[in-house]
């Protein structure tokens, strides 16, 4: 099969054999996959990654021994594959298994390939009404919704999302369900307009205006830091009230510098947030709690992967998808 | 009256007039005051402080118009003096009033002087059974106990305090009430022995051994970072489990560098923690939930303030107190 591969910070299209299906795994034909900021970081050397990237995808099950009823069905997947034996796995949360592999990220080949394997226990059936280009948002949407599973967001809380990148935009649309008056704070008028079109309040940070706490909105009870910038925490602290909460979504591998005294003196609660519940995400998509289609920048055929990655890495780009069903050169 | 003063990073003993008592304030004769790490930082230029330092103290009320029954009584004080009008003050929490002054720290003369003033609403009567040298611990003990007011510490939680400095030691003794098997992790055998003498489990980090997570104890559910070192967070992350909590007590003004990805990937909860409830602290002291007397390094007469500050700044020093009732040169 054809597959993308990252090696030595280079992305290439290679020919490789279809992955062996282990016991309890399904073989999945990939239909569509999304390029995440983390994929771009892997390409820059994050985690010294070498292998097949791709962790946002929708596919169709081709083979499964333990769940034959899945064959022919469209699925999305939890990307964390636990050992099944540790205390985390035994309580049903593979996300923090210390021995875990992560599809497309660590020790498990990803979705920028014709086929991949995944444990059937990680699969979630895609409701019929959802198109591939919607279902491919399930993984990042689950990550966005994870905040609502960690913090009790009440309708009276003043909530903001800082950062109108791919994840920031998605997070604003997702959390608005819990917080109708949520504010999205960003630097890209085009992105903010997209959010506004779905009824979200927005605030534009004018260029050159970095610390705008006094002029800008806030202070907020809950602020989601989704700038994608290691220094995003510094800005986040400008917007949050004493005893408020900052949920951190940025997973940059660059080191962050911050003034810890601001956190202690104001007794700020900083909470790291990562992957979430795919079922909740699929439910949000199926019930149209948000419309993800305007978040798509472009859909590329497989052959144009380089162009797709280049566009995804362009400042201000929305979600770039790759159609794996397209004919392969 | 005689008073210490910090100006241009220099500590001097000066003569100044007794402070004017404002409406609602009491005039307090200082009996004893403790030197805090923050006092040492003020002397190094933190917050460009200029004035009379001292925020850990016990004194005797000499004058009070609105609470005449306080006159002659020994008191300790909440150091945060709010505006009385903002939403924080109106809900009874001056600690986060944006207009607040802070006794001995910001806009309000402190306790290294014969007299100071404080709002009577900030005063707490010292129970008769407590000596001055015990009561002077009320302020830092309240700060140590603040963690128990922010986080629900259950007896089954694995809890550790990282850092056996003045505040770390006090915090371990205080939180042990909630967590009998709490572990104090430090670098000073002498300090750890003090804690062990009060029944606390300890772990010594051998010198040169910085990241000892694999060899050391843990992982912990709740870790109190009390290293006093801006890089203490990095070490704290080695000891805490995924989805665990780090309570940050270090208020160093130096900037901290950290790997944010460790916080997001492991979904760590980081919580800043500052001043606490003086009444709770006095109750802990009165009921002998902990014995603070072994935490005293030395008590100096007022005249030897320079020696006292030098000793307090010595690595590994315990709490240094100044007896303000001693004869003044």
Image (cartoon, coloured by chain):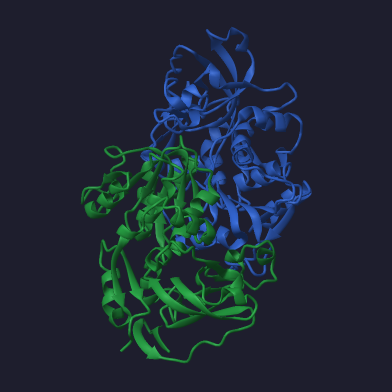
Chain colours: A blue, B green
**Res B300 quadrant in image:** bottom left
Which is more toward the observer, A128 or B280?
A: B280
Q: Is residue A294 visible?
A: yes
The image position of residue B120, as x and y in percent, is 59, 73
Identify the residue at image location x=29%, y=44%: B202
**Res B312 quadrant in image:** bottom left
Identify the residue at image location x=71%, y=27%: A131
Task: Tally the numbered discs.
Answer: 0
Q: Is residue A259 visible?
A: no
| Image quadrant where one finds the C terminus of chain B | bottom left
The image position of residue B207, as x and y in percent, is 21, 51
The image shows residue A206, relative to residue B302, as above or below, that is above
Identify the residue at image location x=42%, y=20%: A85
Q: Is residue B248 left or right of residue A194?
A: left
Which is more toward the observer, A233 or B16?
A: B16
Identify the residue at image location x=64%, y=66%: A206
Which is more toward the observer, A190 or B202?
A: B202
């Amino acid at each position: 099969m054809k597959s993308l591969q990252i090696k030595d910070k280079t992305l290439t299209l290679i020919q490789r054999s279809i992955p062996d299906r282990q016991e309890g795994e399904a073989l999945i034909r990939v239909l569509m996959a999304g390029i995440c900021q983390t994929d771009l970081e892997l390409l820059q050397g994050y985690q010294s990654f070498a292998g097949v990237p791709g962790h946002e995808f929708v596919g169709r099950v081709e083979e499964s021994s333990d769940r034959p009823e899945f064959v022919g069905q469209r699925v999305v997947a939890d990307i964390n594959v636990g050992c099944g034996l540790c205390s985390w796995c035994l309580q049903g949360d593979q996300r923090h298994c210390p021995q875990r592999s992560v599809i497309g990220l660590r020790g498990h080949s990803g979705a920028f390939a014709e086929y991949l394997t995944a444990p059937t226990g990680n699969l979630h059936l895609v409701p019929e009404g959802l198109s591939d280009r919607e279902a491919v948002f399930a993984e990042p949407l689950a990550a966005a919704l994870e905040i609502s599973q960690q913090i009790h967001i009440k309708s009276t809380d003043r909530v903001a999302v800082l950062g109108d990148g791919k994840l920031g935009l998605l997070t604003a649309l997702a959390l608005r369900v819990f917080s109708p008056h949520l504010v999205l704070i960003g630097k890209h008028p085009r992105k903010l307009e997209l959010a506004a079109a779905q009824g979200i309040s927005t605030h534009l940070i004018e260029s050159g205006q970095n610390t705008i706490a006094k002029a800008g909105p806030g202070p907020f009870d809950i602020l989601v830091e989704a700038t994608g910038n290691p220094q995003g925490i510094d800005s986040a602290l400008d917007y949050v009230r004493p005893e408020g909460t900052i949920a951190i979504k940025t997973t940059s591998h660059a080191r962050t510098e911050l003034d810890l005294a601001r956190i202690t003196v104001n007794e700020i609660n900083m909470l790291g947030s990562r992957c979430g519940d795919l079922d909740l995400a699929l439910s949000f998509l199926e019930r149209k709690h948000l419309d993800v289609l305007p978040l798509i920048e472009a859909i590329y055929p497989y052959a144009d992967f380089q162009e797709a990655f280049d566009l995804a890495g362009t400042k201000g780009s929305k979600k770039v998808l790759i159609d794996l069903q397209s004919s392969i050169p």
